[in-house]
Structure formats: structure tokens, C-alpha cells
């Protein structure tokens, strides 16, 4: 029992340290960047699929065998948006072009298949501490494997909010069934001056406590501005200005039972939205 409590205290300490002093926590992020987040009904929106961090943002190296699904959710229902993806070229390496006729708030969602990666022990240990991956920290301490390389299967669940016209709809306030997702508890496009943006993190349909959530102002070249650790109900909140483009992100992992493939199954999730554009 004493050993277990010692590990638990260590996990809490390193996660708290990551929360207090974020650095390169988004070096492996992916997000959807619309050409405009607020558009008129019928107006075309170009969407870039981006990866990187504040200092090095690049287009996602799109490949059909990496893409599991690309859908939108909103007043027009659930729409498969694979056909909206543009051919990959030097000018449009991983973009899509979409439009909706019905006013309301839409969620655009990209989901990838698993990919495998292995990192040297020092880099993997630094990564799981920085991202607050308590399950991996505990597992490696418990099994005395902190000196071994870290092997993981990872996938992504990427969401963006787009406001069409003046009608604000509440579909965005509900989970859409992703394994890991960030769910806003207030529509950011709703009228008002309250800067507080409450969110909850859901994992396999249940609130996820103890997850490290980061807020980044996109396009500023800055590292994450703030981080929060979700409470027992999976809740966290940030104060967000009603201008510019924003990214909220979270990572979660769990030990795998079939260690022949990898040691951990890791999911990266993000929610992006902004206030550029003015509908009529």
C-alpha cells in the first residue's frame, strides 16, 4: 500500500508540474483550421489539416490509408465529408472544401487510424510527464521499465466548430461518440461577453478526470497559454477572448494487454474554433 501511495503522489506531482509550466506539450498536435469560422449559409469554407506546434506548423501528410473518417455534425444531420477532400498537391497538401445551407453551429470531425511509434526511454519519459499521461507514468514506475523505450499505438480525434449564419444551435454541447473528445459546455458563438469557456473531456462515453488540457492561441507563434487538469467530472474551463483562433487539446493513454504490438494505446484529441468572419 505504501508503494502504491508513493507512486500516486509522484504521478500527481509530475502532472501538477506539467500543468504549472507548459512547454512543448503540443509538439505532436493536429487540428482543423477553417479559412473562416463564421460564414454565411452556402458560403464555401476551405479547411486545412495541420500538425505541429507553435514554432513549426506544417500540413498533415494526408493519405487515404491514414484517414478513418471525416464527417460533419449539425442542423443538416451527420454528413460523410470524404468527397469534400481536395486532391493532394503541393498547393493543397491536405485540405477540404465544404459548405452548408442550413444556419446553425456545425462540428467538423476527422479521425485517423492507429499508427505505431517507438521513442527512446528518456524522450518517452519526458513526453508522458509533459502531457500528464498518468497511466503510463504509473505503469512504467510500477513495472520498473522507465529505462526502456516507450512503444505506443496512437490515433487522433480532431474537431472544429464552424458557425453558419446567425442561428446558434446546441448540438455542439453533446458528445458525438468519439473515443476521446473535448465537449464545449457553452457554445462559443453564442452572444454575450462572458469569456469563460467551460469544457468537459469524455473518454469512452464517461467523464475523464485527471487529464491535462491545454489552450493555445493559433497563429501567434506562442506555446500553450494555459493548462488545466480535469476534475472528477471531467470538467475544466479557460477564459478565451472573442477574437482570433483557438485550440483546446488533450492526450490520454492506457496500457495495452497485447504488448506484442505496443505498450500503450494513445489518443490525441483537439477542439478548434475562432471568431473570424461575419455572417449576414
Image: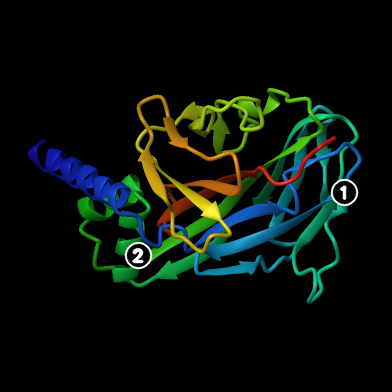
Label 1 environment density (alpha carbons within 10 Å; few <14, some 14–19, many ≥20)? some
For residue 260, which quarter of the picture?
Answer: bottom left
Q: Residue at x 38, y 34 (%)?
A: 230
Instruction: Decide if residue 167 is on the left or right side of residue 265.
Output: right
Which quadrant, please, contains the N terminus?
Answer: top left
Q: Residue at x 61, y 37 (%)?
A: 178
The percent coordinates of residue 22 (x first, y second) are: 35, 55
Residue 147 lies in what quarter of the image?
bottom left
- The scheme the figure's colours follow is rainbow
Quick one: SS at disc 2? helix
Q: In front here: 49 or 273?
A: 273
Q: Answer left or right for 123 relative to 185.
A: left
Q: Which residue is mark 1?
A: 44
- Residue shown at 91% from the left, 35% from the top: 101
Local secondary structure at mark 1: loop
Which quarter of the figure is the C terminus placed in?
Answer: top right
Instruction: Please name whichever residue, 182 or 245, is drawn nearer the observer in this view of the structure.
Output: 245
Q: Residue 153: x percent and y percent?
A: 50, 58
- Across and down, in percent, residue 231 comes to 35, 29
Left-right relation of 28 to 78: left
Q: Residue at x 87, y 38 (%)?
A: 100
Q: Is residue 113 visible?
A: no
Whole-Å distance between the Cαs marked 2 and 1?
A: 41 Å
- Neighbour class for label 2 at 10 Å: few (<14), some, many (≥20)? many
* Disc on res. 7: none
Q: On residue 124, which mark appears?
A: 2
Question: Can residue 40 be seen by looking at this rendering?
Answer: yes
2 or 1: tag closer to the N-terminus:
1
- Give 156 or 262, whichever is nearer the viewer: 156
Image depth: mark 2 or mark 1 in front: 1
Amino acid at each position: 500500500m505504501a508503494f502504491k501511495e508513493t507512486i500516486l503522489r509522484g504521478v500527481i506531482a509530475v502532472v501538477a508540474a506539467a500543468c504549472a509550466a507548459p512547454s512543448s506539450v503540443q509538439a505532436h498536435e493536429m487540428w482543423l483550421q477553417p479559412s473562416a469560422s463564421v460564414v454565411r449559409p452556402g458560403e464555401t469554407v476551405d479547411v486545412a489539416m495541420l500538425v505541429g506546434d507553435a514554432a513549426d506548423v506544417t500540413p498533415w501528410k494526408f493519405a487515404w490509408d491514414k484517414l478513418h473518417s471525416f464527417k460533419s455534425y449539425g442542423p443538416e444531420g451527420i454528413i460523410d465529408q470524404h468527397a469534400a477532400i481536395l486532391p493532394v498537391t503541393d498547393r493543397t497538401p491536405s485540405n477540404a472544401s465544404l459548405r452548408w445551407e442550413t444556419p446553425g453551429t456545425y462540428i467538423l470531425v476527422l479521425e485517423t487510424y492507429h499508427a505505431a511509434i517507438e521513442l527512446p526511454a528518456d524522450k518517452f519519459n519526458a513526453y508522458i510527464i509533459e502531457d500528464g499521461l498518468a497511466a503510463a507514468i504509473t505503469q512504467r514506475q510500477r513495472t520498473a521499465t522507465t529505462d526502456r523505450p516507450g512503444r505506443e499505438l496512437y490515433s487522433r480525434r480532431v474537431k472544429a466548430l464552424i458557425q453558419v449564419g446567425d442561428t446558434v444551435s446546441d448540438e455542439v454541447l453533446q458528445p458525438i461518440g468519439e473515443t476521446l473528445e473535448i465537449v464545449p459546455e457553452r457554445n462559443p458563438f453564442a452572444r454575450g461577453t462572458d469569456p469563460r469557456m467551460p469544457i468537459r473531456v469524455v473518454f469512452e462515453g464517461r467523464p475523464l478526470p485527471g487529464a491535462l488540457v491545454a489552450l493555445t492561441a493559433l497563429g501567434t507563434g506562442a506555446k500553450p497559454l494555459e493548462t488545466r487538469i480535469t476534475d472528477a467530472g471531467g470538467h475544466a474551463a479557460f477564459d478565451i477572448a472573442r477574437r482570433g483562433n483557438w485550440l483546446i487539446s488533450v492526450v490520454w493513454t492506457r496500457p495495452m494487454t497485447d504488448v506484442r504490438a505496443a505498450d500503450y494505446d494513445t489518443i490525441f484529441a483537439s477542439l478548434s474554433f475562432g471568431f473570424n468572419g461575419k455572417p449576414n
